[in-house]
Image: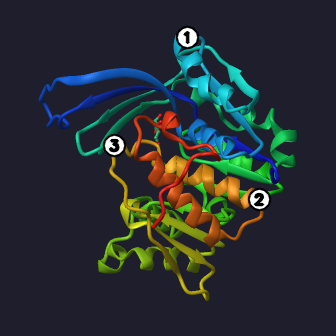
Amino acid sequence: MGGSIVVVGSLNADLWVRLDRHPLPGETVRGETAITLPGGKGANQAVAAANLGARVAMVGAVGRDAHADVALSLLRASGVDLTHVREVDGPTGLAIVSVDRAGENSIVVVGGANERVDAAFVESAAVAIAAAGIVVLQGEIPASGTAEAVELATGRIILNLAPVVPLPPEILRSANPLVVNEHEGALALGLLRGANTAPSGSDMADHAAIVLGLLAEGVPTVVMTLGAAGALVGEGPAAPLVHLPAPHVHVVDSTGAGDAFVGALAQRLADGESLVAASRFAARVGAFACTRRGAQPSYPTADDVLPDV
Ligand code: RIB
């Protein structure tokens, strides 16, 4: 077991629905299965890291409703420290997740209690955040909460800018690494250049150009997740980018695969691995997560055999 990880982020109940195909606007389609599962990008990443053996604490909020128990269930089972998860008035965060035959998902998130995780809330966990070897952040709590966590952190910051929220450039530049997909990466580049939109132009179609642009704007390291195409790792503007392929798997449901990647990355970085080695492992964990239903229930433990490239 390596250094400790604190995840500051969202907890949700995922209302997970399997359907043949996603509806068009104005259309009604029949769902086949509906089940409520634990989710939320922050909680997903915490569970992914803890399942793999990391020492993890979570900072976040649930509401006073039946969904709170769902949202906390696998965090509890995987041994995540919940001292800094508070119950607040109002509903627990809720995500409506629909997954089609090809395993493609579409997600609507209602923040609920997660909207309460602002700067003052995060400040109340200052000691734990300051003591963490790694602080993991996403974009499902108010931007002020994320910025406060960065302010308090003394360890390494992993910022998964999903979804993209308008954070100040200095917060993006504190990420080591910034973890984004290609769309998030383009939007993050816009934020660094003082725009609220993604830069336009043919060069932005090029994943490598986006990663190099983020590095040139002062982000120390960048990991761009590319789904089945793997990941691109950039360690400073002078170092060559490293492309890591993802193992080929039969995709049942890709929900939360990106979170599995981030959690595994955190676990390996906490263990002292290099960014490239940790990202290679994380790509295998992300692929594993695609082979099972749901987010947290799909994550491997240290005993599972991971797919290889
Ligand atoms: O990344 C997947 C997650 O996004 C789901 O678990 C859902 O809760 C939303 O936050």
Query: Residue beneath label 1, please?
Result: 65
Which residue bears the numbered disc 3?
Answer: 252
- Tag 2: amino acid: Asp
Check residue 271 in the rendering and tell me which mark sits there, or answer none. Answer: 2
Quick check: marks 3 and 2 in contact, CB under 8 Å? no
- The x and y percentages for residue 303 are 63, 45
Which of these two is toward me, 277 or 114? Answer: 277
The residues bearing labels 3 and 1 have C-alpha atoms spaced at a distance of 30 Å
From where the camera sits, is residue 197 visible? no
Image coordinates for residue 220, horizontal then vertical, percent: 66, 73
Mark nearer the N terminus (1 vs 2):
1
- What residue sits 74% from the left and 44% below the top? 6
Crowding at dot 1, Cα within 10 Å, few <14 / some 14-19 / many 20+, comes out as: some
Q: Report if residue 58 is visible in the image.
A: yes
Q: Earlier in the sequence, mark 3 or mark 1?
A: 1
For badge 3, the amino acid type reads Val
Give residue 206's quadrant in the image.
bottom left
Q: Earlier in the sequence, mark 3 or mark 2?
A: 3
**Is 152 placed above or below 126 here?**
below
Q: Say whether marks 1 and 2 touch (CB < 8 Å).
A: no
Q: CA distance from mark 3 to mark 2?
A: 30 Å
How many numbered circles does the render carry? 3
Q: Where on the picture, by quarter, is residue 31?
A: top left
Please name the amino acid that badge 1 sits on. Asp
Asked whether the residues under the numbered discs 3 and 1 touch, taking CB atoms below 8 Å apart as contact, a structural biologist would say no
Tell me the SS state at disc 2: loop
Callout 3: few (<14), some (14-19), or many (20+) C-alpha neighbours within 10 Å?
some
Is residue 212 rendered to the left or right of residue 95? right
